[in-house]
Amino acid sequence: MVFGALRGIELKTPDQLRQMRRAGLVVAAAIAATVAQVRPGVSTRELDAVAAETIRAAGAAPSFLGYGSVNGVGGFDGVACLSVNEEVVHGVPGARVLAEGDLLSIDCGAVVEGWHGDSAVTVAVGRPTEDLLALSDATRAAMWRGIGAARLGGHVADISTAVERSVREHPGGYGIVEEYVGHGIGSAMHQPPDVPNLVSRGFLRTPLRGAAIVEGLALAVEPMLTLGSPDNHVLDDDWTVVTDDGRPAAHWEHTITVTARGLWVLTAEDGGEAALAELGVPFGPLAD
Ligand code: MG
Ligand code: MG
């Protein structure tokens, strides 16, 4: 069924992928600049301004600002999703002030000449507890295991399987959020195919192995893990996703593509070279 699996999926030309790399580097810079300002006492609104300034200074546009608006009304009111502790994703920047020991996820997107990058990191505020650090590390590791499983001739479910296996290896166990998933990305931030973070239930509506991984496909791989139950709901602001049990969550994300030579992590400053080497996966950027 590979025949039908590519329907509706945008395949990028090499030049379009190079444009996405430019967007990815802007996102990497925006996240790095924001991370550098994370400290107790800073508000999420102040952090959002740092991301906004970095994106604008690079001559790019933020992907998230106004996302979901209808005829220019409403939409996401921020440049980054800043999600603290029990907030899983889509936290709206605002008056919330970070405190020592908080866990913050910074999710940011930028667009350069019509091509998008999307990435997220989780960082601790001040000195985190061991369990929060372990949660973030497990989420980051699951993301890289998922990325490392992507190869030409494979399928999206290979990524989902690798993410889930990576998480299930932890003896304490973490929750895997199912309702929010990775995605195709390119001329829009969110495109088909979905990239679920587990296969045991996540592929119920997508039998077989999901979309084929071919040259020109770009995906955002983004596991969201919880310290307690992964059950969650959306707050009255219609954006912020929080865990039902109020326990913390972590979120990591990169935008990737697979070339004939290997993987290229478009939103990593080094293109993913270091992390891929650790995984024993070929690093395969396109030549300039
Ligand atoms: Mg994102
Ligand atoms: Mg995303």
Image (spheres, grey):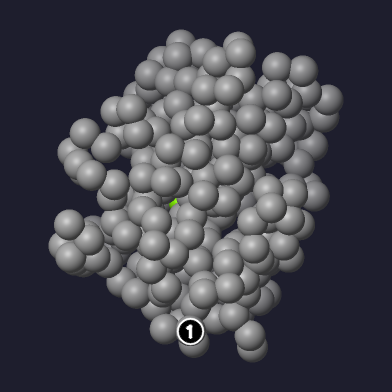
Q: State the image quarter where residue 241 is shown.
A: top left
Residue 54 coordinates in the image, percent (x, y): 68, 66
Q: Is residue 72 visible?
A: yes
**Depth order, front residue of 264/135:** 264
Residue 201 coordinates in the image, percent (x, y): 29, 28
Residue 49 as seen in the image, left or right of residue 74: right
**Residue lying at 49% horizontally and 39% vertically, measured from the top left:** 162
Q: Is mark 1 within 8 Å of ligand 2?
A: no
Instruction: Report the residue that reaches farthest toward the right.
Output: 127
Residue 34 coordinates in the image, percent (x, y): 71, 52
**Residue lying at 60% horizontally and 12% vertically, measured from the top left:** 172
**Residue lying at 52% horizontally and 72% vertically, measured from the top left:** 259
Q: Secondary structure at mark 1?
A: helix
- What amino acid does circle 1 point to? Pro
**Residue lying at 17% horizontally and 57% vertically, measured from the top left:** 1
Q: Quadrant of the C terminus?
A: bottom right
Residue 197 coordinates in the image, percent (x, y): 42, 37
**Depth order, front residue of 76/253:** 253
Instruction: Using the image, determine if residue 100 lies above or below residue 91.
Output: above
**Depth order, front residue of 220/247:** 220
Q: Is residue 24 visible?
A: no
Q: State the image quarter where residue 125 is shown.
A: top right
Residue position marked by numbered label 1 in the rendering:
14
Instruction: Using the image, determine if residue 29 lies above or below residue 44.
Output: below
